[in-house]
Amino acid sequence: MQNQPILQVKGVSKAFPGVQALSDVDFEVYPGEVVALLGENGAGKSTLMKILAGAYQKDSGQIYLNDQEIELTSPHHAQTMGISIIYQEFNLVPTQTVAANIFTGREPLYGGAGRILKMVNKQEMERAAQEMLDIVGAHVKPTDMIRSLPVAERQLVEIAKALSFDSRVIIMDEPTSALGDEETQNLFKIVRSLKDQGRAVIFITHRLKEVFEIADRIVVLRDGRLVGSVPAQDTSIDGLISMMVGRSLDQMYQKETAEIGDVVMRVQGLTRYGAVEDVSFELRRGEILGFAGLVGAGRTETARLLFGADALDGGEIWIDGQKVSIHSPEDAIRAGISFVPEDRGSQGLVLLLSVFKNEVLPTMSHFTRFGLLDGATLQQRAQEYVSRLNVRTPSLEQKVMFLSGGNQQKVVLAKWLMSNPKVLILDEPTRGIDVGAKSEIYALMSQLARNGIGIIMISSELPEILAMSDRVLVMCEGRVTGIIDRQEATQEAIMAYATRHASVQGTI
Amino acid sequence: MSDITAQPRPAGAPPRFNWRRIIRGQEVGIFLVLIGMILFFSLSTDRFLTPINLTNIMLNFSWTAIAAFGMTMVIISAGIDLSVGSVMALAGIATAMLLARDNSPFAGPDGVVPDTVIPLAVLAGLAVGALCGFTNGLLITLAGLPPFIATLGMLQIARGIVYGWSQGWPVQNLPQNFMVLGRQNIPVGSFNFPLPTVIMLVAGIIAWIFLTRTAWGYRIFAVGGNEQAARLSGISVMRTKLMIYTISGLLGGAGGVLLTARLGVAAPTAAQGYELDVIAAVVVGGTSLSGGEGSILGTLIGAAIMGVLRTGLNLIGVEAYWLPSAQGIIIIGAITLDQWFRRRQGKSRGFARLFSRGGK
């Protein structure tokens, strides 16, 4: 590693009305280095990265690129200086080809009259795009439409685009949050090769385990201040968490043993062709049943069948010993099943609407007088749950789009708790949420279980599954391959079931 | 992270009707446009601010507004209803057919239609409108057609029925007591409110309550804001859409019946192109074409703007031929102003966002 930082930030501060997002932060990154940037939501990570990417202007402080002080005026400016950022929500046009996206605004043109008429040399553009795609090892064609690509491939296109600017510094904002294990490993391979080429990579993530796998150095922010910058080999997950929140790991998973009661839900032979095959299990009151498996194993699909979001091709469901027929989410809600989907923004919430309206949507019809909503009672209930779940919002009238991920997730939970469910299905309940909010959600799950709710928790984070589940149901290719008791559940056992297509065993 | 915590509104507080909310609301931008236009026309000609002229203006935008209330719900649900002009005409013809002297099936031997048929005929007009809307809803939900296509088809079909049924001739000779619906004035002090305007205001209040105080209204916003999330919240998207388009048809029908009563004749070309006026009123009123946002009050103001404009330009001597261009300019101008205004509000809202999360 060279001793000269490629990018250096000195004493940068940034304030927004009412909040000091960054105060006096020093930060540097060296060529060929991978730096992980950690911190809770609101710690200032995104603000810092957006300043480096030219999207925000700093209030004070200096930025040096190769020892030259620079002022970044716009994202485009930063890009031409060799700093690229890849946002969680990609900046790609879904209806355009891969090549057109990589070269947006700088399409190679034909010479002569073609230059004046801005005639795009498509062949040249596709050739150049292919070159970039080869570097990142993406298995897509330059002529593919972005909308036809899975998330992981889109990400590679973004990286290829960054490379086409010959970016020396590449910033990735939670690049793995939507990826499965294998895709994550592939991404890391690419990051390592970027590093070998002497590029610097800055990596924002919430998944602490990844940090040790990929980062050379870890920088932690808290409340807009630099808390520490440590070499990855000199720290541990526990150490990082206490740096981030001033709390240790043991306190994060707040699993309390609840009394396991009668069977609340029994599922027999649940099937949807091509997605879910012959899934059977029982769920008891007060039990947290973890659903583990690789991405695409059929866990979310199973949950959607239970909630009536997709149509069943076969199978039966009993709630409290009564057979129920579920053809729509309405039916499921009536039967006492609630479902917190994995994607808050597109499935869990109506972002344009207020906290209040989102909260009351499933239950409001029970609170009407002469057809009119009983506003006072609804407000009171909504407020009660906002307080109970500690949702940080200036008011019930705040649009949920302005809340942080953790608070949005709490609004989704509040909305379902208001319906008094017997069975609560949580799909990736802590994805993209900071450590503080995570531990609050774990505590809430424990509390709900104690109150006798049966909980199904789908999660791709094994530590979360292991810490919170009373039993773990493992799926592979649409089938249940194993159901493991808490005592016997280990990462190895789960992965063994998740990766092979074994016959049903365990304790059904 | 900021320290903002929820500030509970005292439980059981009185309904939130306070002026600051309204003034901060989205309608303020276009309301200023309306006031500005009224001021402009009042200063330009002393014939503008006369009781007769004001009565005329109100009358003129009453049917547009009634249909626009339904359209507001459609557009909040992220849909569109292009058929509303034709539905107005069809409802008008249906009513007129039942009431026309000599030609009505209810006509006595002397050709006179008894007054008792009037309520029936009005209801028939409304039912025809609702049925057209319901059909739109079925096409959109069951057949899965985009609203634009389904209602474009209905626009043609309904207009065709109007022409075919009337054989291209206007239906005339309607009973006097029917035309009262469109011509009666209700004096309030020294001012005469036209009956259609009163009906429009009542419809507006009902629509407003429906949208903001009932579960159905909340569902419309939820479906328009995020259909998937609405479905996963247990809302039947299909029933909601069926209802919305039926209401739009019903209100279109009501507008058509009133228009017929006012004109005293149901012409096959009646209300042609009205769908664009209606959509313009809704959009000028601040309802977002991408769904999830909008208000009845905004639509009322939007319709008023269109009405004031038409009459005002007339009075200051703009040649009728040029009127559409002027209207187009005003629509674009009003929406530009409104968006500018919202962006300014949005900025403070954007700050509020940072305030509550402080960046990541």
Image (spheres, coloured by chain):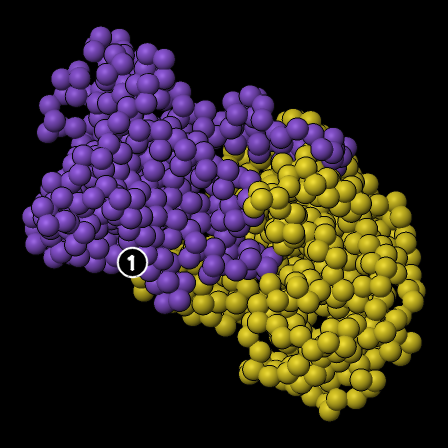
The chain drawn in purple is: B
B335 vs A83: above or below: above
Mark 1 is on which residue type? Ile
The chain drawn in yellow is: A
What percent of the width, then of the height, locates residue A494?
A: 79, 78
Extreme-front residue of the structure: B109
- For image coordinates 77% across by 37% down, the residue present is A223
Mark 1: which secondary structure? helix
- For image coordinates 73% across by 76% down, the residue present is A322
Q: Which residue is mark 1?
A: B149
A25 or B96: nearer the eye? Answer: B96
What percent of the width, then of the height, locates residue B239?
A: 47, 59
Q: Image quadrant of residue A179?
A: bottom right
- For image coordinates 87% across by 78% down, the residue present is A485
Can residue A477 be seen by looking at this rendering?
no
- For image coordinates 74% across by 30% down, the residue present is B10
A497 or B127: nearer the eye? Answer: B127
Q: Image quadrant of residue B260?
A: top left
Q: Is residue A25 left or right of residue B128?
A: right
Can residue A315 be seen by looking at this rendering?
yes
Q: Is residue A207 left or right of residue A50?
A: right
Q: Quadrant of the C terminus of chain A?
A: bottom right
What percent of the width, then of the height, locates residue B131?
A: 32, 56
B2 or A202: nearer the eye? Answer: B2
Q: Is residue B173 left or right of residue A211?
A: left
What percent of the width, then of the height, locates residue A197?
A: 60, 59
